[in-house]
Image: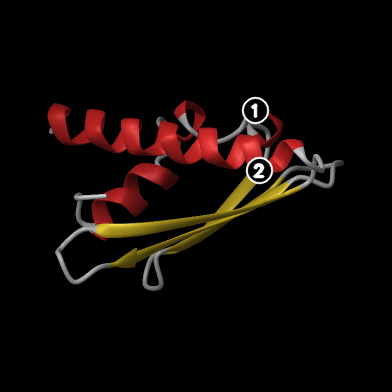
Amino acid sequence: MSAPPEVVFNTAIDPDRVGAWLPEPLLSAIGNGDTARLRARWDAPDTDWSAELRVEPVDAGGARLRLDLAGGGQEAGRLAEEALTNLVRAVADNLQAG
């Protein structure tokens, strides 16, 4: 995506925005982030659902996103795609607002 990696990461971990993109099974998850490495992880209590997001800079000045979603079997792949689409939308909204 064309946004700076730090903007993408900060949008992803913002408590006011995480509900706009994180899959529903993880909305009660406890998240922790590593700002220096642009990585975050969410683990849903009492379930096998977890997610790990990595944001990497690309040479063109944007960011590459990788979301590893565990839990839910085959549904996890579809939810991961939807989550990334929603995160891209949340970042765009964040950039327009700020």
Image spot of residue 21 (x, y percent) = 48, 32
Q: Nearer the viewer, residue 13 or 52?
A: 52
Up-down relation of residue 12 to residue 15 (above or below): below
Q: Residue at x 24, y 28 (%)?
A: 93
Query: Which quadrant of the structure image shows residue 27?
Result: top right
Up-down relation of residue 18 to residue 53 (above or below): above
Q: Residue at x 33, y 32 (%)?
A: 90
Q: How many residues crowd mark 2 within 10 Å: few (<14), some (14–19), many (20+)?
A: some
Quadrant containing the C terminus is top left
Specify the color scheme. secondary structure
Give the left or right position of residue 19, taking residue 79 as reference: left
Give the left or right position of residue 66, taking residue 73 as reference: left
Q: Can you tell which mark lies on residue 77?
A: 2
Give the left or right position of residue 38, taking residue 19 as reference: left
Query: Which quadrant of the structure image shows residue 65?
Result: bottom left
Q: Can you tell which mark lies on residue 45?
A: none
Q: Earlier in the sequence, mark 2 or mark 1?
A: 1
Q: Residue at x 20, y 50 (%)?
A: 3
- Name the residue type under label 1: Glu
Q: Nearer the viewer, residue 12 or 58?
A: 58
Is there CB contact under 8 Å for labels 2 and 1? no
Question: Separation of disc 2 and disc 1 at Cα?
Answer: 14 Å
- Name the residue type under label 2: Gly
Q: How many residues crowd mark 1 within 10 Å: few (<14), some (14–19), many (20+)?
A: few
Residue linked to disc 1: 24
